[in-house]
Amino acid sequence: MLVIYRSVTITEGKKHDVTVGRMLNFPKGSMVAIDIAYNDYAWYKQLTDRDIFFVTRLKNNAKYRIIDRRSVLKNKGLTCDQTIEFTGPQLSKKWPVQLRRVGYRDAETGKHYVFLTNKFKLAVKTIADIYKARWHVELFFK
């Protein structure tokens, strides 16, 4: 069963989105799509500990090692589906668990995206679509 929970919080422009996000009480099992600009691994761990799932983009400078690789349908724009763990000295302490790294090339723009999630039981394309759906929020406010 898929339950969509939408929440809107409007604040003055000076308040950072991740600050508001940390205050929200998402129901267990929620899926939160988070912009790369608001990257907060400690918060991601809190979400995971509360059985809340997230999809975000992986920063280019993240240091990690690949634990496992799964096959993907390249003709669907999928480029990778991997289990990773962080290796950087600070991040490996904040996030001592494995995550999923998903690569996707958007057919419309040709841009390549790499997503990070704690949800292992969704199709790779679904992970990409969840993040792509959050782009519509950005377009709404432009």
Image: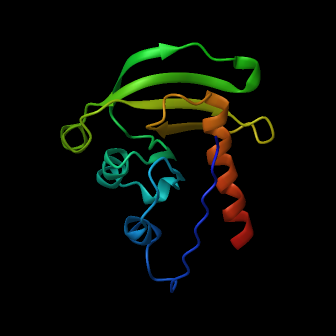
Q: Is residue 112 at least partly visible in the picture?
A: no
Work out whether 123 lies above or below 12: above
Rendering coords of residue 72 (x, y %): 63, 17
Could you say which is closer to the camera, residue 125 or residue 24?
A: 24
Quadrant of the frame with the C terminus: bottom right
Work out whether 84 lies above or below 127: above
Rendering coords of residue 113 (x, y %): 60, 38
As drawn, which residue projects farthest toward the right?
A: 108
Q: Residue at x 51, y 86 (%)?
A: 12
Q: Is residue 59 at least partly visible in the picture?
A: yes
Q: Residue at x 68, y 63 (%)?
A: 137
Q: Is residue 101 left or right of residue 2?
A: left
As drawn, which residue projects farthest toward the bottom?
A: 12
Rendering coords of residue 118 (x, y %): 43, 37
Q: Residue at x 62, y 47 (%)?
A: 131
Q: How many marks?
A: 0
Could you say which is closer to the camera, residue 3 or residue 120?
A: 3
Q: Is residue 62 left or right of residue 138?
A: left
Work out whether 62 lies above or below 65: below
Rendering coords of residue 76 (x, y %): 75, 24
Quadrant of the frame with the N terminus: top right
Q: Residue at x 33, y 49 (%)?
A: 41
Work out whether 92 lies above or below 13: above
Locate residue 126: give its quadrant. Answer: top right
Q: Is residue 101 left or right of residue 139?
A: left
